[in-house]
Image (tube, rainbow, N blue to C red):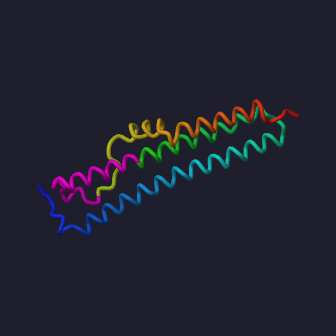
Amino acid sequence: MNQIKAVDYAQAIQTHLGILQGIIQRMASNSGACKAYCVTLVSAILVIVADKGKPQYALIAGIPILLFLALDTYYLGLEKAFRERYKDFVLKYHGDDLVIQDLYEVAPLGGLAGHMVAAFRSFAVFPFYLTLAGMVYAAGRIVIPAK
């Protein structure tokens, strides 16, 4: 095959790894932004609901929770898939199995659905959104007085 020598392609290998690292970093940043925007939006909805004295409308805050849960799971699934791509590339490099076609192949490795399920079950997603949903429920039932 077209196995490559690290000496001949050192700059290309470094660039490829840098591209993958950049993608992984953006996915992680997007995940953090999802959580921040979700908390902000849910808080704003609860403030409006409390101001109007309509605790039964607190569950409207569940809509952005579900939407951001899906988006966050997607970003973390992509992050995991690109980490797998990175790991696969490095293993090929160290095993002398790297071919020219591996360079600049920037696509998630593996099935994205499987990575998304793993991301959904992770400590970074499920407990966060479950706790937020529980707080919304408690706010609607206990904290917000009806007018």
Q: Which of these two is toward me, 54 or 144?
A: 144
Q: Position of residue 53 (x, y in %)?
A: 84, 37
Q: Which of these two is toward me, 57 or 47?
A: 47
Q: Is residue 3 left or right of residue 20?
A: left
Q: Position of residue 32 (x, y in %)?
A: 54, 51
**Residue 147's quadrant in the figure?**
top right
Span colored in magenta = 80-104
| Residue plotted at (58% across, 39% down) | 129
Q: Position of residue 77 (x, y in %)?
A: 43, 44
| Residue plotted at (41% across, 55% down) | 24
Of the 4 image quadrants, the one containing the N terminus is bottom left
Give the total number of marks visible in the rendering. Answer: 0
Q: Position of residue 18 (x, y in %)?
A: 35, 63
In this view, the residue farthest toward the left is 1
| Residue plotted at (33% across, 48% down) | 84
| Residue plotted at (37% across, 46% down) | 81
Q: Is residue 84 magenta?
A: yes
Q: Which SS type dominates the magenta stretch? A: helix
